[in-house]
Image (cartoon, rainbow, N blue to C red):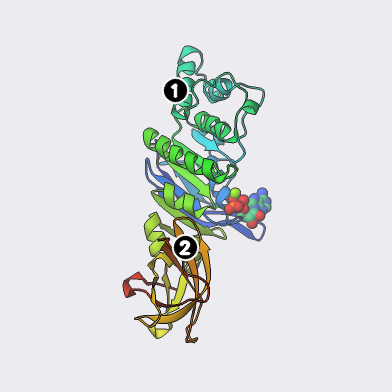
């Protein structure tokens, strides 16, 4: 198990800086997620750490060792990509044995390690199947077993659940978190899914155009975003004007709705989106001016408000987070 440190890491492709002066320190055993939109440089960062790609400038350390110029096979890293990348002609067991063979671990010892890794991802009994005989979720579990079977120093996961449907993805998120906790392996996950990032990680790094925007614990990034980009990427943000021309963010679940004519700003419901446990209301403030549309999210209790209904909107000063 090792820590990861990036110091001023950049990767340029012509005029594009896919990674732009990135500093990041991931502690031993920590689970950090790189979160950003498509094209923000997530895969580039991971491939630089894995040694599949060389930085234009900056240094990369794994377990305190400068690996910037070390080839991939000298980095002892477990890797999982969105596409399962299993060997189709090999059985599940042979796939998981493969990285052990590369490391000259063979025989009963290797077999025992492979079976143990398959047990960890709950695939015991499927050793003899071929990848084509497995579901997408099972294939990704094999990929995970193959990535951890040789006890890597660090685990790098590039959108590993991206190809799975929502329910399966949520199941595997829980399993991935449990696996990471059991092994205690330092993990860097890449995703564009903010819920996945918020639910799995000890900390997240939000990336935009190759530049880190914020590195923080999930709740801190959500409630105290460093800037507008982070505020909007991590969910719905209501931007409200503050005294002195500043802007603040209020999250939808912090918006309170009361009966028309009571305390608060008069508003009209323009849209009610039923989401199961919650209802998301789009609101237009009546008196114009600072009348930016607002979004509120309230638990569904028996009845939802309907478009056109008048309400009073309020929020607490403590629920406003100023952003630049
Ligand atoms: P993400 O994984 O966040 O979607 P990538 O790291 O794949 O982003 O890409 C970041 C940026 O770098 C994009 O603008 C992409 O087009 C560019 N890029 C990535 N790889 C290459 C390459 N081999 N050659 C040229 N441009 C690249
Ligand atoms: Mg990518």
The reply to whether discs 2 and 1 touch (Cβ–Cβ < 8 Å) is no
Residue marked by disc 2: 279
Tell me which residue sits at (44%, 56%) in the image.
277
Q: Nearer the viewer, residue 227 or 233?
A: 233
Q: Secondary structure at mark 2?
A: strand
- For the residue pair 168 and 13, the one nearer the viewer reads as 168
User: Which residue of the protein is positioned furthest toward the front in this rendering?
Assistant: 302
Rendered view: 60 above or below 306: above
Q: Position of residue 63 (x, y in %)?
A: 40, 39
Within-10-Å neighbours for mark 2: few <14, some 14–19, many 20+? some
Residue found at the very far top of the displayed protein = 108
From the viewer's perspective, is 52 left or right of 227?
right
- Closest to the observer: 264 or 230? 264
Is residue 146 positioned above or below 278 on the image? above
Q: Does residue 237 appear anywhere in the picture? A: yes
Disc 2 to disc 1, how far (Cα)?
A: 45 Å
For the residue with label 1, is its CB less than 8 Å from the closest atom of ligand 2?
no
* 258 in relation to 44, above or below: below
Which quarter of the rendered picture does the C terminus lie within? bottom left
Instruction: Give coordinates of residue 224: x percent, y percent.
Output: 38, 65
The structure residue drawn at horizontal position 54% and vertical position 29%, both measured from the top left corner, is: 142
Residue 310: x percent and y percent? 46, 78
Front tag of 2 and 1 = 2
The residue identified by callout 1 is 116
Label 1 environment density (alpha carbons within 10 Å; few <14, some 14–19, many ≥20): some
Horizontal side of 271 relative to 14 (left or right) equals left
């Amino acid at each position: 198990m090792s820590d990861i440190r990036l110091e001023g890491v950049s990767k340029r492709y012509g005029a594009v800086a896919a990674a732009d002066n990135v500093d990041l320190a991931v502690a031993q055993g920590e689970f950090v997620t790189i979160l950003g939109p498509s094209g923000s440089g997530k895969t580039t960062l991971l491939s630089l750490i894995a040694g599949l790609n060389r930085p234009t400038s900056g240094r990369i350390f794994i377990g305190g060792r400068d690996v910037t110029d070390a080839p991939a096979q000298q980095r002892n890293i477990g890797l999982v990509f969105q596409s399962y990348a299993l060997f189709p002609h090999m059985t599940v067991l042979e796939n998981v044995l493969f990285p052990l063979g590369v490391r000259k671990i063979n025989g009963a010892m290797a077999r025992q390690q492979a079976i143990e890794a398959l047990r960890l991802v709950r695939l015991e009994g499927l050793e003899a199947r071929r990848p084509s005989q497995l579901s997408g979720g099972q294939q990704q579990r094999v990929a995970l077993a193959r990535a951890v079977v040789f006890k890597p120093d660090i685990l790098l996961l590039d959108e590993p659940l991206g190809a799975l449907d929502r329910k399966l993805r949520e199941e595997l998120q829980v399993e991935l978190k449990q696996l990471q906790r059991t092994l205690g392996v330092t993990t860097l996950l890449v995703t564009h899914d903010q819920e996945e990032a918020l639910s799995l990680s000890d900390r997240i790094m939000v990336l935009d155009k190759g530049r880190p925007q914020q590195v923080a614990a999930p709740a801190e990034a959500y409630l105290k975003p460093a800037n507008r980009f982070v505020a909007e990427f991590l969910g719905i943000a209501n931007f409200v004007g503050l005294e002195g021309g500043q802007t603040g963010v209020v999250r939808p679940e912090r918006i309170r709705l009361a009966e028309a004519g009571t305390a608060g700003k008069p508003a009209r419901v323009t849209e009610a989106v039923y989401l199961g446990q919650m209802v998301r209301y789009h609101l237009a403030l009546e008196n114009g001016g600072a009348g930016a549309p607002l979004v509120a999210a309230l638990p569904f209790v028996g009845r939802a408000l309907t478009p056109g209904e008048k309400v009073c909107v309020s929020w607490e000063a403590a629920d406003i987070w100023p952003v630049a």
